[in-house]
């Protein structure tokens, strides 16, 4: 993956992540994608969860920019069957919800930026999913 992708993604995320509404909108979309996913968050402190998401996406972006995968390995552990039990097939729904939310909140978002996001963060998502 070229540095161009990680720069595009870093800037795109920067345009979105200073607005709390971005994270609220993401969880509305993600929880709306399946009953099972809605049930996962039934007793969740959502403001705290949104803060964790903000950091988690940043870890994916930093990994794309060449940071070691230590934090993503830890996310893989916590989300595995021994942790939260986040099933591998749910990561596609997560990425779809993220891209739809980026499209709604990043005024510069287009198909090229969507492809850059996919190329940049799919390796990190695979690392987390692979720990299941």
Image: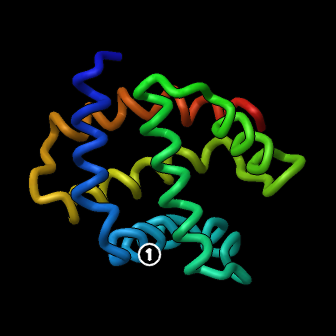
SS of the residue under disc 1: helix
Which residue in the protein does label 1 denote? 28
Residue located at (89% from left, 47% from top): 82
In the image, farthest residue toward the front:
67
Q: Is residue 45 left or right of residue 79?
A: left
The quarter of the picture where the N terminus appears is: top left
Residue located at (46% from left, 47% from top): 58
Q: Is residue 81 left or right of residue 35?
A: right
Coloring applied to the structure: rainbow
In the rendered image, residue 46, in percent from the top left (x then y), is placed at: 59, 79
Q: Decide which of 84, 93 is in the foreground and name it.
A: 84
The 10 Å Cα crowd at callout 1, few under 14, some 14 to 19, many 20 or more, is some
The quarter of the picture where the C terminus appears is: top right
In the image, farthest residue toward the top:
2
Position above or below: 2 against 111: above
Q: Is residue 28 left or right of residue 75?
A: left
In the image, farthest residue toward the right:
82
Q: Decide which of 96, 20 is in the foreground and name it.
A: 20
Position above or below: 81 against 7: below
The total of numbered circles placed on residues is 1
Q: Is residue 107 left or right of residue 2?
A: left
Residue located at (20% from left, 39% from top): 113
Location of residue 126 (image quadrant): top right
In the rendered image, residue 94, in percent from the top left (x then y), is placed at: 50, 53
In the rendered image, residue 60, in percent from the top left (x then y), is placed at: 49, 39
Location of residue 104 (image quadrant): bottom left
Location of residue 111 (image quadrant): top left
């Amino acid at each position: 993956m070229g540095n161009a992708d990680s720069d595009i993604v870093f800037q795109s995320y920067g345009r979105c992540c200073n607005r709390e509404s971005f994270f609220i909108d993401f969880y509305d979309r993600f929880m709306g994608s399946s009953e099972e996913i809605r049930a996962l968050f039934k007793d969740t402190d959502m403001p705290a969860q949104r803060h964790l998401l903000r950091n988690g996406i940043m870890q994916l972006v930093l990994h794309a920019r060449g940071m070691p995968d230590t934090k993503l390995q830890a996310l893989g552990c916590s989300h595995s069957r021994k942790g939260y039990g986040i099933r591998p097939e749910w990561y596609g729904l997560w990425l779809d919800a993220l891209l739809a939310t980026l499209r709604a909140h990043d005024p510069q978002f287009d198909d090229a930026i969507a492809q850059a996001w996919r190329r940049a963060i799919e390796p990190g998502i695979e690392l987390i999913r692979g720990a299941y």
